[in-house]
Amino acid sequence: MSLANRALAAKKLLASTGWTKPDAKTYPTSGDWAEQHLRPLADALGERVRFGARVTGVSRAGRDRIVDADRVIQPFTVHVTHADGREERLFARAVIDSFGTWAIPSPAIASGLPALGEKAAADRITYRVPNLTDPAARYTGKRTAVIGSGASAFTALASLADLAKTEDGAGTHATWILRRVISGSTFGCGSADQLPARGALGLAAKAAVGEGHADAVTGFRTEAIEREGDRLVLMAEDGRRLDPVDEVVVLTGLRPDLTFLGELRLGLDERLHAPTELAPLIDPNQHSCGTVYPHGVKELSHPEQSIYLVGMKSYGRAPTFLALTGYEQVRSAAAAIAGDHEAAERVELVLPETGVCGGAGLFDQPQSDENTDGDCCAPAPALIPLETTAPAPSCCS
């Protein structure tokens, strides 16, 4: 999504400060997002923004989660700890939690718990898309295992392939580890994706494999990570051992931090940790094109009134969140807090087709040329021939 398409209220506030709107045709990195939008917005809001602070707890004033009496009329108390150790208590009649899921990445192993040896090898493992400009030396000329099958993994594969093509990048190579087999939907919708930049990521990952900068290892469910000298060896549940690698990049998803909300009465799905009304729409065991529609306070409500989990955090462990969805969620929640219930329930967003079909819950079900009904993505232009099953017909056009 371009930096120019931001919430109208934020744009109006920034316009009054002389803010220069970013080029609408560009696609921001997280650093661009922070520097070109969030920091100017924080400056415009002044002392209402606290830096170097962390929320450590939210509850009803004088009420833990057990107490019913007068609960709904008590304000929220938000416990904040500052970088210098100073503690602060803030009172509010409503809370919007947009903390996201970035702080808690999922581990390499399919069970959701760390693989054997994963913690011991932490110095050679990252759970973020690597920044190959600083410090690129960590990956330059090295063999890197990339675990994951989503947009983050595509980004890592494409970036490592670009590094391999540079003058100093000789020997840079990726081993791409997937729990599923490669099928017609593995690389997304390509040029049929209504979010073109994401479609291009899938094509770039496909090219990385086709051009020999990455080897794809399919049906590999990591069980253990062992040290072999200065390198790491990944082992699968079925006993397979891969050739040693220098670095491991784990991009298997994220999960929300709910620890500081323990004294609130949240209604969360037992699998996804998403709000119970929202969870069926985003369940990766069932999700296919068109199942997620724009939503607001109705789907985000909890037994505890006036608390809203929005943005990536509202999706819990589901991997298919779009920033546009978060903006609509916040608009709806803000309208509800302001008492404009008609606006809160009104949908003001049309989402593009995502091209994301069938999530992590389906990885054990092999696909073949004859069984591609579950795929919903248009066949992407074949940049490089690969040994894959036939692409499925489009349902995303």
Image (tube, helix red, strand yellow):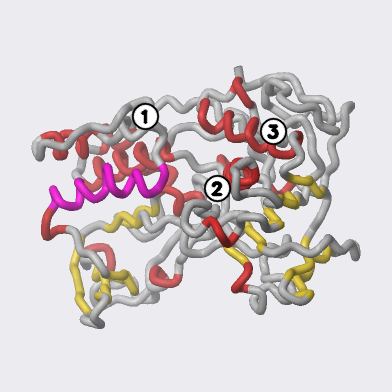
Give the alpha-carbon distance from disc 3 to disc 1, as whole Å: 39 Å
Q: Amino acid at mark 3?
A: Ala
Mark 3 highlights which residue? 207
Q: Residue at x 25, y 57 (%)?
A: 94
Which residue sits at x=76%, y=30%? 184
Decide: is 194 above or below 79. Answer: above
Alpha carbons under labels 3 and 2: distance apart:
34 Å
Residues 28 and 347: in front is 28
**Residue 69: percent from left, percent from top:** 28, 72
How far apart marks 1 and 2 lie (CA) works out to 19 Å
Crowding around mark 3 (Cα neighbors within 10 Å: few <14, some 14 to 19, many 20+) is: many
Depth check, mark 3 against mark 1: the one in front is: 3
Mark 2 lies on a secondary structure that is helix
Picture layout, residue 351 above or below residue 322: above
Image quarter in which the C terminus is found: top right
Disc 2 residue type?
Ala
- The residue that mark 2 highlights is 279
Q: Quadrant of the N terminus?
A: top left
